[in-house]
């Protein structure tokens, strides 16, 4: 994907098989959004999920207690 910055916005370009584009287009229509809006929202949600999984440490209640007791 290529990225260009113009007036505070960046442009993404992707080539996808026709079947994939048709599926995305149909899903976007069902959501009442444009393909662009749908792709940006989907990418943003997945990016946030990936970042959260990498940045957050999740502990069970027992492990959290052990951790804080050790502090």
Image (cartoon, rainbow, N blue to C red):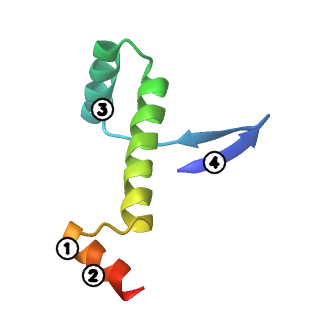
What residue sits 24% from the left and 32% below the top? 19
Marks 1 and 3, how far apart in space?
50 Å
Q: Residue furthest bottom?
A: 70
* Residue position for label 1: 62
* Residue position for label 4: 3
Marks 2 and 3, how far apart in space?
53 Å
- Whether pointer 1 and pointer 2 mark residues with C-beta atoms closer than 8 Å, the reply is yes
* Residue position for label 3: 18
**Residue 50, x across and y down, in percent:** 38, 57
- Secondary structure under tag 2 reads helix
Marks 2 and 4, how far apart in space?
46 Å
What residue sits 28% from the left and 25% below the top? 22
- Whether pointer 2 and pointer 4 mark residues with C-beta atoms closer than 8 Å, the reply is no
Q: Nearer the viewer, mark 2 or mark 3?
A: 2
Near mark 3 (Cα within 10 A), the count class, few <14, some 14-19 or many ≥20, is: few
Quarter of the rendering occupied by the C terminus: bottom left
41 displayed left or right of 12? left
Label whose residue precedes the other's in the sequence (3 or 4): 4
Marks 1 and 2, how far apart in space?
6 Å
**Residue 32, x across and y down, in percent:** 37, 11
């Amino acid at each position: 994907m290529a990225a260009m910055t113009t007036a505070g916005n960046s442009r993404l370009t992707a080539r996808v098989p026709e079947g994939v584009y048709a599926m995305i287009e149909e899903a976007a229509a069902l959501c009442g959004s444009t393909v662009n809006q749908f792709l940006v929202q989907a990418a943003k949600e997945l990016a946030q999920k990936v970042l959260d999984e990498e940045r957050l440490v999740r502990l069970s209640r027992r492990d959290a207690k052990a951790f804080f007791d050790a502090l």
